[in-house]
Image (cartoon, helix red, strand yellow):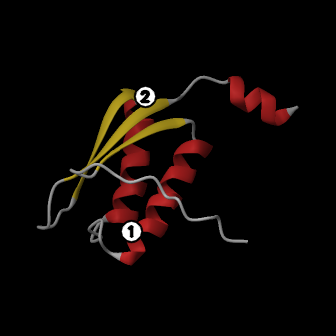
Amino acid sequence: MTDTMEEQLPAQGHAKIVYLGPIAPHWEIRAISGDQAFMDGFRDRVQARLLLLPPHDPQFRRNRERVNRDGERERIYIEWDLGYEEEEDTRPPRS
């Protein structure tokens, strides 16, 4: 019952994460909507995960998934703008 209740709750906010380029800082986290203090806390956590990681760094993929899970848990809709079209991941999930 808890799962269905969580699915029905509205989003707490909306964030857009933008890759700025190869020179650090690489990322800008924009709060599109949501409580300012709540979104500032989320921005700080995301910035800590992505601070020195460009998108081509192997650690970026793992940290991006962590950011996405954090957003799901906190009901924040996340948009990524990496500056290029992303290909769908066609690999089978790991067991």
Q: Quadrant of the C terminus?
A: bottom right
- The percent position of residue 19, horizontal first and vertical second, equals 23, 54
Q: Which dot, 2 or 1, sits closer to the camera?
A: 1
Comparing 92 with 3, the one in front is 92
Location of residue 49 by image quarter: bottom left
Q: Tell me what residue is drawn at x 29 percent, y 71 percent.
A: 56
Q: Residue placed farthest to the left in the image? A: 23
Label 1 secondary element: helix
Label 2 secondary element: loop
- The percent position of residue 22, horizontal first and vertical second, equals 14, 67
Q: With respect to residue 88, does 38 lie above or below? A: above
Q: Quadrant of the N terminus?
A: top right
**Total numbered labels placed on residues in the image:** 2
The amino acid on which the numbered mark 2 sits, given as a three-letter code, is Asp
Q: CA distance from mark 2 to mark 1?
A: 27 Å
Residue behind mark 2: 35
Q: Tell me what residue is drawn at x 57 percent, y 36 percent.
A: 75
Task: Report whether 14 appears left or right of 55.
Answer: right
Name the mark on residue 51: none
The amino acid on which the numbered mark 1 sits, given as a three-letter code, is Phe
Q: With respect to residue 78, does 4 lie above or below? A: above
Q: CB under 8 Å between callouts 2 and 1?
A: no
Name the mark on residue 60: 1
Comparing 80 with 10, the one in front is 80
Location of residue 34 by image quarter: top left
Q: With respect to residue 45, does 1 lie above or below? A: above
Q: Tell me what residue is drawn at x 43 percent, y 66 percent.
A: 61
- The percent position of residue 50, horizontal first and vertical second, equals 34, 64
